[in-house]
Image: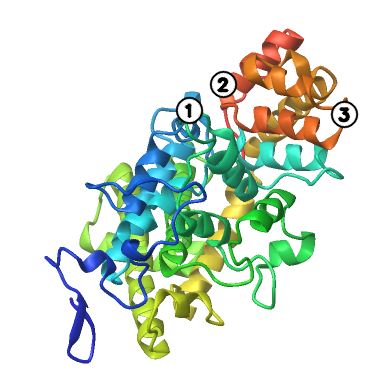
Amino acid sequence: MALQRGDQVFWAPGNARGAFTAPWAVNPEESRGRLIPELSSPTRTPFQRDRDRIIHSTAFRRLAHKTQVFVPHEGDHYRTRLTHTIEVGQIARALARALGLDDDLAEALALAHDLGHTPFGHAGEDALDARMAGHGGFDHNAQALRIVTRLERRYASFDGLNLTWETLEGLVKHNGPLNGPNSIEKYRKRGVPLAILEFDAGYCLELGSFASAEAQAAALSDDIAYNAHDIDDGLRAGLFDIPDLREVDFLGEILREIEKLHPGLERGRVIHEIGRRVITRFVEDAIAESRRRLEDANLASATDVRTGQRPVIAFSDSIVAADVAFKAFLYPHMYRHDRVMKVRNEASAVVERLFDYFAEHAVSMPGEWAVRARSAAQADTRRLRLVTDYIAGMTDRYALAEHRRLFGDAPQITIAYS
């Protein structure tokens, strides 16, 4: 199906330039560039280079061994942060192509959105945030920005990945503006993280405006992916069973549809059918609602997207209600399940003990971490931030190995909270 305004077609199957022909798309030829200027590539757009740098980063590889809901040794088929990220990237490209957006930028943002996560999922994040209270706290979006602008050390000419302005903007603001009248609730309550404010002071990311439509597509894709795969993983782990899903009207309708089309279908195939139908319905709804918003807004440029008063990539009201119902179901049945909470508490304790030890013995961190710690005053904010950066970059198994090395043992963690 073509996307058009009047007689002008912005995207249709087979349109090679369809990824960025819509007026509301970010055009890579008009990128605001990089903090440190570089020569352009003769073979790749700026956003393709960003995507490739993210994929080749150390932080991206570590996602393979960071918790989504179940740590890797719980089972080979549960999601990790990496498999979740790949699924988000696939959905983001699909949304971007359907809406005439730059799918390389959307994919780059999808692949980068979880780079700042700690070991053991949100359990680790909450533990570090509590330990850093009074020193700027911890926020995984701010940590992702630190990784791509400072902590990655691969290139001869700069620290970080030197990504384009558009990718940095989308990484920071994909969930919405960080300040101003349209700011997201999280930052209205606790303020914008210091790491973001410090970077913005030297390289303005326009924190009070919406991000690009590509960034909004990546954010929506994250919601779609984890709704579908948390249902899938929860069923396979036995935290709840297929009949329990009927508590959610949206899922009950899908189950009735599967039963009608495939009576007596084996359990494993039912689980897969549920997931694929959830993704399809959410994606198709997002495309339809976003097309309506984009066309009604009569946008002339990507700047118009940023200066708008609401997101242009969104779900319809009915799917928003379904999304709320999903989360209301998953919260008690999965995220606060007794088995999950037991290991969440154990994981938090691991991160807390590691932080407390390295806060007192920062120079015992390996390699360059120790060198940098020696130049920071004892227990000051800079020194504690170094400790936080070190721990946040750990994989689940490395954190357990460090705990075992320092304290002689480590809990047998098999499930952690997402």
Question: The N terminus appears in which quarter of the rendering?
Answer: bottom left
Residue under circle 3? Answer: 379
Residue appearing at x 48%, y 34% in the figure:
157
Residues at marks 3 and 1, CA–CA distance in whole angstroms: 34 Å
Percent of width and height locating residue 46: 35, 52
Camera-side residue: 37 or 368? 37
Find numbered disc 2 in the image and state the secondary structure of the residue it sits on: helix
Residue appearing at x 43%, y 45% in the figure:
85
Give the mark nearer the N terminus: 1 vs 2.
1
Eye-nearest disc, 1 or 2: 2
The answer to whether residue 337 is visible is yes
Height in image: 343 above or below 261? above
Residue appearing at x 88%, y 25% in the figure:
378
Position of 30 compared to 209: left or right? left
Question: The C terminus appears in which quarter of the rendering?
Answer: top right
Percent of width and height locating residue 282: 38, 66
Residue under circle 2? Answer: 397
Amino acid type of disc 3?
Ala
Residue under circle 1? Answer: 72
Height in image: 212 above or below 230? below
Position of 346 compared to 302: left or right? right
Eye-nearest disc, 3 or 2: 3
* Residue 385 lies in quadrant: top right
Find numbered disc 3 in the image and state the secondary structure of the residue it sits on: loop
Amino acid type of disc 2?
Arg
Percent of width and height locating residue 342: 69, 33
- Please report contact status of discs 1 and 2: CB closer than 8 Å, yes or no: yes
